[in-house]
Amino acid sequence: MVTLEEYTASETGYISKCTDDVTVSKTIIAYPNQKPWMTAEVGMLLRTQDSAFRTGDRDTLRKARAHLPRVIREAKHAHAQRIHGHFQDTREGIQAITNYRKTSPSCDSDATLPDALNDFYARFEAQNNVAAEKFIPPQNDQVLCLTADDVRHTLRVLNPWKAAGPYNIPGRVLRECADQLADVLTDIFSISLNCTIVPTCFKTTTIVPVPKKPTVSCLSDYRPIALTSIIMKCFKRLFMIHIKTQLPPSLDPLQFANRSNRSTDDATSSTLHLALTHLDKKGTYIRMLFIDFSQSRSGAALPTPPH
């Protein structure tokens, strides 16, 4: 009998294998002095003009020089339209105008760094002596029932640029192949809910240490970015939709987490609006408390402090 672990691992592995078979890799060379509006057509005309000049082909040189201004003008116009579209995000618009290119900090060549980071991130688990217990649901408990239409809709609204997880299944593949993957993923999700077991491949996470500063002096200067499986994120989104239906409609208006069309920018704007509105009154002041939950997502069960 095939277990849930084997079933899920075989399906995700097959999806990853098919993705690798049809993915075409291309190497694009970008020079520091290359114009941002440069296109393949402009580059081809420039190479044709240079080749005709060296070989002495006057007809080809005359045609290339005649077409080059028009092609450059069209390329600049298309680049201007892209910049206008980027102005929906102010930061992207400024970066497009200034041709800003972010320089990534150099990687540390120390071979012991991965082991040191592993021990540093897992330092709380070393103190975790609580044995894991499987939750046994009551007999009269109704298991959440997912339909293929729900899974298909969740896959179709995925962000195609979302970072892929450990099994390297891109979000674009899940979105474009939603009709083909909806049934099998619905089957996996339903078995997981009935057995109260989350497959290991869904819980596997790739930790990418991103430097917080240009110069790293200690392990705390790395920000751990967890890349989880996109399929698991879809599973959690379906489960979150069910949880929201069980919540009362009178939610706090300042609740921004796990709510649609709400973000950190909205929370910051609301906080500043309340603070500035209060400060407009004469003889008033405010006190604000910022709590950093830097280790809130570790999931480690810390020991109970002594009384």
Image (tube, helix red, strand yellow):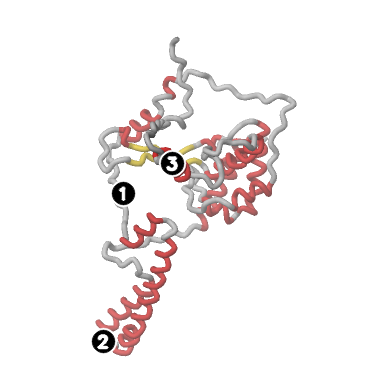
Kind of residue indicated by mark 3: Thr
Q: Secondary structure at mark 3?
A: helix
Relative to 135, residue 103 above or below? below
Q: Earlier in the sequence, mark 3 or mark 1?
A: 1
Q: Secondary structure at mark 2?
A: loop
Residue topped by disc 3: 277
Q: Residue at x 35, y 41 (%)?
A: 210
Residue 56's mark?
2
Q: CA distance from mark 1 to mark 2?
A: 45 Å
Outermost residue toward the front? 282
x then y, percent, for residue 187: 67, 42
Left or right: residue 124 versus residue 254 is left
Whether label 3 touches label 1, CB < 8 Å = no
Q: Earlier in the sequence, mark 2 or mark 3?
A: 2
Q: Is residue 207 visible?
A: no
x then y, percent, for residue 245: 66, 38
